[in-house]
Image (cartoon, helix red, strand yellow):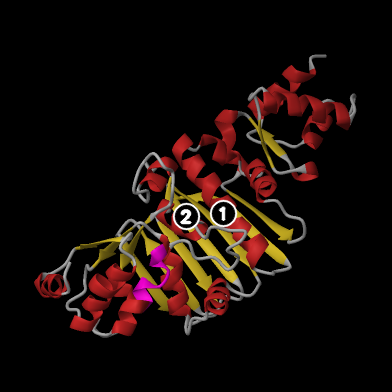
Amino acid sequence: MDIREEILKLARNKKKFKTADVLAELKNEITRQYVSRVLAELVVEKKLVKSGSTNKSFYSLPANIAALGDTAKKRLLNHGLKEHIVLEQIKAQAPFVLRLRDNVRSIFDYSFSEMLNNAIEHSESESIEVKISKKNHFLQFVVRDYGIGVFRNVMKSRSLSSEFEAMQDLLKGKTTTAPKAHSGEGIFFTSKAADKFILESFGFRMIVDNLVKDVFFEKQKRSTLGTRVIFDISLNSKKHTADIFNEYQVRRDDFAFNKTEIQVKLYTIGTIHVSRSQARRILSGLEKFEMVVLDFDKVPMVGQAFADEIFRVFKNKHPEVKIVPVNMNEPVEFMVKRAGH
């Protein structure tokens, strides 16, 4: 009896099957261990696709991969977890990942690993839930913990006064609660790689929507205990991880994260930008970069003190940092020039 051919015959007759189905078809004439070994060989040879693990595994022909489902999830105990191992485990449960374009799979691998690492090392949560799914031409992953909360953690470590200030700092990049161990780049670059990136924690939500090129801070009606990350990217995305990193390098050959972009409108709620304190809030931490792009889109007016703090005081204190204002209307441009830029 050709066991391999019998298994492939079963695969042609059934869109998906389990090890038990093979044993039943062969009337238990061979051992489960032997069948499992042959199945593993067929998967390595890419003649079959596997979904799940241990006794919950299903198999199919590559052409019937959709039968294995479009969702995979795991609940993990946060003890000795390694993000690269979890990544491979969750991908084994989600064979549709095998059909992703190389650029999308690379972005998924990077972003999922970064967000899971944050949960493992910073959340202090006893358990972490991960989920990946494919729906409506989008790939989505969710990483959820029940820990101290990303915004509260940043507030505490940086002595900030509100969750909104924590969101502002996270969008600058290089914001971390463990500077000796982490660069603070994970959330920044993951939010740039996504088509839509959502960060929720204890009643506050930050949405980075790269499809409409905008960012939103919200207070939720229902509070999310701990932190939930939701990441969406089109299955047809043309983004590449290298391009995303290159965009925030002043020089393409030094591979350094030394450029950032700030949406000025996010640093006020319901008022124009007039005070030095508002300017200092924007400038906090920017001395770490060589170039800062200040985007004044949707900012109607700035005050003299605000412009002076950025374009004269900060510039004199940190001449090595180049500040580039963009998307200014006439009133804003007048104040910026008046401040000496």
Q: Check disc 1 and report the residue beneath it.
A: 114
Q: Where is residue 199 in the image (x, y as percent from the top left)?
A: 49, 67
Up the image or down, 105 lies above or below 126; here it is above
Q: Nearer the viewer, residue 301 or 229?
A: 301
Q: Is residue 286 magenta?
A: yes
Any mark on residue 235, and which? Answer: none
Answer whether residue 310 is magenta in the image.
no
Give the residue type at disc 2.
Thr
- Image coordinates of residue 237 in percent, x first then y, are 38, 43
Q: Is residue 256 left or right of residue 118?
A: left
- Give the SS element for disc 2: helix
Quadrant of the rendering where the C terminus is positioned: bottom left
- Image location of residue 30, percent across then percent down: 89, 25
Marks 1,2: beta carbons within 8 A:
yes
**Is disc 2 surrounded by few (<14), some (14 to 19) or many (20+) residues within 10 Å?**
many
**Residue at left offset 62%, top offset 56%:** 117
Residue closer to the observer: 78 or 121:
121
Image position of 128 with respect to 139: above or below: below
x 56%, y 36%: residue: 98
Nearer to us in this view, 186 or 37: 186
CA gap between label 1 and label 2 equals: 8 Å
- In magenta, the rendered stretch is 281-287
